[in-house]
Image (cartoon, rainbow, N blue to C red):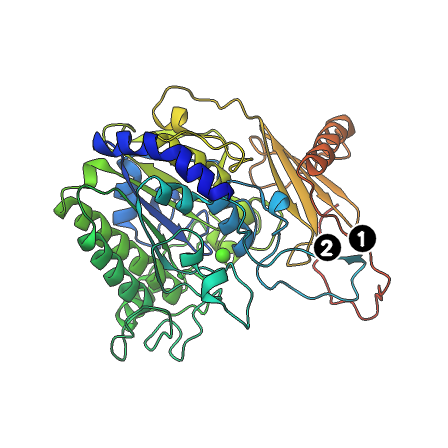
Amino acid sequence: MKKLLSALLLSSIISLTSAEGKSPNFVFLLVDDLGWGDFGCYGAEFYETPNIDRLASEGMQFSNGYAACTVCSPSRAAILSGCYPARLHLTDWITGHKRPFAKLAVPDWKIELDHDRVLLPEALKEAGYATAFLGKWHLMPIGKPNFDEHYPTSHGFDINIGGREWGQPKGKGKYFSPFDMPNLDDGKEGDFLTDKLTDAAIDFLDSTKRDQPFLMYFSYYTLHGPIMSPPELVAKYKKKAEGFDNKKNEDLNPKRAGMVESLDNSIGRIMAKLEELGVAENTVVILTGDNGGDNQKTSGGLRDFKGYSHEGGVREPFLVKWPGKIAAESRCDEMVIGTDFYPTMLEMAGLPLRPDEHRDGVSILPLLTGKTKDLERDELYWHYPHYHRTQPYGAIRHGDMKLIEFFEGGLELYDLKKDPKEANNLAKKNPEKAEVLLMQLKAWRKSVDAQMMTENPNYDPSKGKKKRKQKK
Ligand SMILES: [Ca+2]
């Protein structure tokens, strides 16, 4: 009913926007397990990303862009809903780690998206957009997939190519054919998943109509493991690694480098297709990741990586191009996060904001257009009541200061401006600041009805899995 009413309310506004032919198209590119240091424009020297670097130079590049979680599913849900994972109660990757004997019990969190929310693709679809989903979905229960309830097509996408319950390619050939993914051509032996999904993306772009705006939400399976790459790219980077002076301690795995190059090729093909179709000028292209890379050397010097509480787990490349609206070569240091895309894209489309839906996102359009350098929002929050590489934690970033609260005990406080690598924990040196931020973090959790961990009656340290110790 809620969706029907909002559709009716919007219909008049929509016809106006579309009739003027001003509604921009959206190409949303979401890369899996993308490290902050994986692209040339973010400092990579071993990996080669000329197309992505060009995209960065044609729009705005953010230095403090964040994923809403340190793992896949919650970050994806945050982008689609405009809400923090804590508010959605979808706080871990599906289906998460089981730690029955750990000190704290994990709350009864959700493993699917609510149907009573109007998600970003639904809002755009209501407004007359053609909506296509390609790639990794990972927002549904594993085991008993139900097309009507859980697939992208039940959440606002007209078509779904490749999305299913998997968090990574699990077909017989993994990244190589056969893929065993919905509506994706398996191709021939040796065909590579990123290329085949890109073929499908090109087909979708070819099918779009000039009088109907579109959202192409391309959610790459790459760079998630298993790390696999076309043999010619592996050979290229194997050779490059031999004489490479690795000053920045970058990841020299030729297979991962090949995955990044194949991603870059994909983006190059998409950008060329937009030009060829004559729609590049009226198309917003967004590129970001869902969480950090899979190892320390992908983090561009930040501490830790996917699955951790520190910056390498959540800081992401974050690029937006919109010709004529966002100045080329622009840079922004303001903090932005995955929940912000929903309101931002509505505003770009000339549609009314829906604050009852995207509860936690703010439109970053004023940053993109250069109208302002600062948003009114001063804090970002993370809530991860789960065991992973990290111990369960919550975090707040206020300005340059970031506080991490480990739920088993322990606080870490960092000044990210002076200490971007989070090497000097200031919690004991500056307890007043730590306390203020802790109070703020706790108040926020209450305000979003965050699920908390509880004492585990089955706690048994002798059976607990060994955990990496956090610095206190
Ligand atoms: Ca991921």
Q: Residue at x 23, y 51 (%)?
A: 270
Q: Nearer the viewer, residue 175 or 471?
A: 175
Horizontal side, residue 189 vs residue 89: left or right: left
- On screen, residue 16 above or below 52: above
- Residue at 28 percent across and 71 percent down: it is 185
Between 7 and 457, which is closer to the camera in this rendering?
7
Residue under numbered circle 1: 454
Report if the CB atoms under discs 1 and 2 are less than 8 Å apart: yes
Sequence-earlier tag: 1 or 2: 2
**Mark 2 element type:** loop
> Of 288 and 404, which appears nearest the observer?
288
CA–CA distance in space, label 1 to label 2: 7 Å
Q: Which numbered circle lies on residue 125?
A: none
Where is residue 35? Give x, y as percent.
46, 51
Q: Amino acid at mark 1?
A: Thr
**Percent position of residue 79, x then y:** 47, 45
Query: Where 84 falls versus 168 (above or below)?
Result: above
Across and down, in percent, residue 356 comes to 54, 34
Q: Is residue 302 visible?
A: no
- Secondary element type, mark 1: strand
Name the spot of residue 62 as percent of width and height, x first: 41, 35
Is label 2 within 8 A of ligand 1 (CB to nearest ligand atom)?
A: no
Q: Quadrant of residue 462 in the image?
A: bottom right
Say whether residue 234 is left or right of residue 119: left
Which kind of residue does numbered mark 2 sit on?
Pro
Q: Mark 1 packing: few (<14 Cα in 10 Å), some, or many (20+)?
A: few
Answer yes or no: is residue 160 visible: yes
The residue wearing badge 2 is 107
